[in-house]
Amino acid sequence: MPAGKFTQDELDQIYAFAVDLGRKAGDLLMERVEQRIDGSDAPQTFEEKENAVDIVTQTDEDVEVFIRDAIHTKYPTHKFLGEESYAKGESREYLLDAQPTWCIDPLDGTVNYTHLFPMYCVSIGFVVDNLPVIGVIYAPFQNQLFSACNGRGAWLNEKRRLPLIRNPIPPMPANAPSQCIFSCEWGKDRRDIPDGNMHRKIESFVNMAAEIGGREGKGGMVHGIRSLGSATLDLAYTAMGSFDIWWEGGCWEWDVAAGIAILLEAGGLITSANPPDDFDTASIPDVKLGSRLYLAIRPAGPSATESGRESQERTVREVWRRVRQLSYSRPGA
Amino acid sequence: MPAGKFTQDELDQIYAFAVDLGRKAGDLLMERVEQRIDGSDAPQTFEEKENAVDIVTQTDEDVEVFIRDAIHTKYPTHKFLGEESYAKGESREYLLDAQPTWCIDPLDGTVNYTHLFPMYCVSIGFVVDNLPVIGVIYAPFQNQLFSACNGRGAWLNEKRRLPLIRNPIPPMPANAPSQCIFSCEWGKDRRDIPDGNMHRKIESFVNMAAEIGGREGKGGMVHGIRSLGSATLDLAYTAMGSFDIWWEGGCWEWDVAAGIAILLEAGGLITSANPPDDFDTASIPDVKLGSRLYLAIRPAGPSATESGRESQERTVREVWRRVRQLSYSRPGA
């Protein structure tokens, strides 16, 4: 069976429900945006969570309630894990287990949303045995809906199959990370601590960016560095083939559950952001959903000398060679 | 008269032509994209210009020829300055003068385009007496067309007036750059030279990002740092009000001519990226189109204690306090 106890037919029905739910939740986001634009709603306010850049709006909470209620009505036996209800709890434990669970971010890219920068979205993941098997990501201002169901391919707006270029799917560049777009985020941990997460991230970014031969041999001369402010959309664009590499520490399972389902179904690879000591030879571990440490590589086809998977694994090692270990943890993961 | 020797009526006609031209050029970009997606076109190739991340495709050149021919036919007396024809010349001189000139980037965000990341666009600026008075920016994959004509307002898709939030237009935050989205690009100069442009940029980015009190008092704790890989779209989103601050060195007049027209018409401010020694008290100079050094602030309305312009100028000084001078120059600018 494709995913634990579910038949493909059952999964297909859940998938159709998730796509419909994603569109409705995105439309709700857009309604609020229209009210702000036409002046019928009060100016956007937000509350700070961990610090001044970790924020939540009433919209996050309202959309989460909308999604949760719809799921509880349709699938009363399924578990629900949403960013805002989780954040209100006292624990930071990883709560997913073998049960079928909806893992939801009602509004990813909340900072973008408050500023009306279009890179915000709804993220709906359905997880079975800790593996995301259905994902729906909808960015309503851009009318971009990314979706996938185990066994059914990954799609943009239900009509363009992902990755976009697939006749044939290009291998990773022979000299990766050169010729790659590297997607990464500055994140919310801005503490100016020597060797803290912010400085380790920056050191890693600079290694990826610098000319070949620079940075004591670590210069990666990537084609470009992109930061959108939405981990969810970073993953969606990696599944689409637009970003070659996404490297991130600090986000949470609801930021990535839907994106992982879409990336894997499109043929991408996702593993840990943190390089093992023997990064050149270590086996490439499967991602841990709650690890807060992610490295994704876009779908890749074969070349004359390598399988697609081989070119992805080679790229993982070339990233690991250039990045620092990040320090994010949580109980239970 | 609104712009040199042109009446408003003449400008309106040129504007209508420019919008139509922008759409047609964008459609041409999308045709090529569709051919790559359906496999009827060969895989994307590109040539390197100054280095491995400064690239040009046949599409850049074809779209520039299309735009240039259309302008020559319609306005044979106007000057034309396009990125690709300029880049083929031997000089790096600034070529704009008092004559009415079309300043064009046929494809901004070429790296994004080759990877099919949607943040690429056509940029068409019309410049009179060195001042951009008409701007059209069209990102066809997202169907986002930004446009403005001196005296006619700035618009998204010819129906949403910019900035998006205007009932009322919010002032800049009292504690800017905190609560601001800071837009910036890593750029093409990746030389790992101590105190070179790349390292000066990074030092500036980190100052803007770090917690308040960090970085020896320079920490700006911005809401977010965004890098799209398109200076043109950075400016468009600043005009839209989505980005609060855009700071950039190294791009060229064809990257910014259309965006400056749109930003100014929306009520934004644009000046030099490089802080003067007396940044706290210096007058804020008008941007020089060919300076390759740009600092843009989004449209801002009044607060109880400041005019919109005052809050923009305060923000300029707070950015200048935190950024390094960059070293880009050119003859004739």
Image (tube, coloured by chain):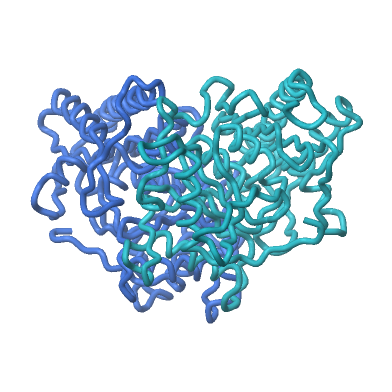
Chain colours: A cyan, B blue
Report if residue B148 is visible in the image. no
Does residue B117 appear left or right of residue A20 in this picture?
left
Residue drawn where x is 52% and y is 54% of the image: A184
Q: Position of residue A328 (x, y in %)?
A: 68, 63
Residue furthest toward the right?
A: A77
Does residue B62 appear left or right of residue A195 in this picture?
left
Between B9 and B249, the residue placed more toward the observer is B249
Q: Position of residue A244 (x, y in %)?
A: 46, 44
Does residue A112 appear left or right of residue B203 in this picture?
right
Q: Quadrant of residue B68?
A: top left
For the C terminus of chain B, give its image quadrant: bottom left
> Looking at the image, is B185 positioned above or below residue B9?
below
Residue drawn where x is 82% and y is 38% of the image: A65
Q: Position of residue B177 (x, y in %)?
A: 54, 64
Residue drawn where x is 52% and y is 39% of the image: A237
Residue furthest toward the bottom?
A: B216
For the N terminus of chain B, give its image quadrant: top left
Residue furthest toward the left?
A: B90
Q: Quadrant of residue A21?
A: top right
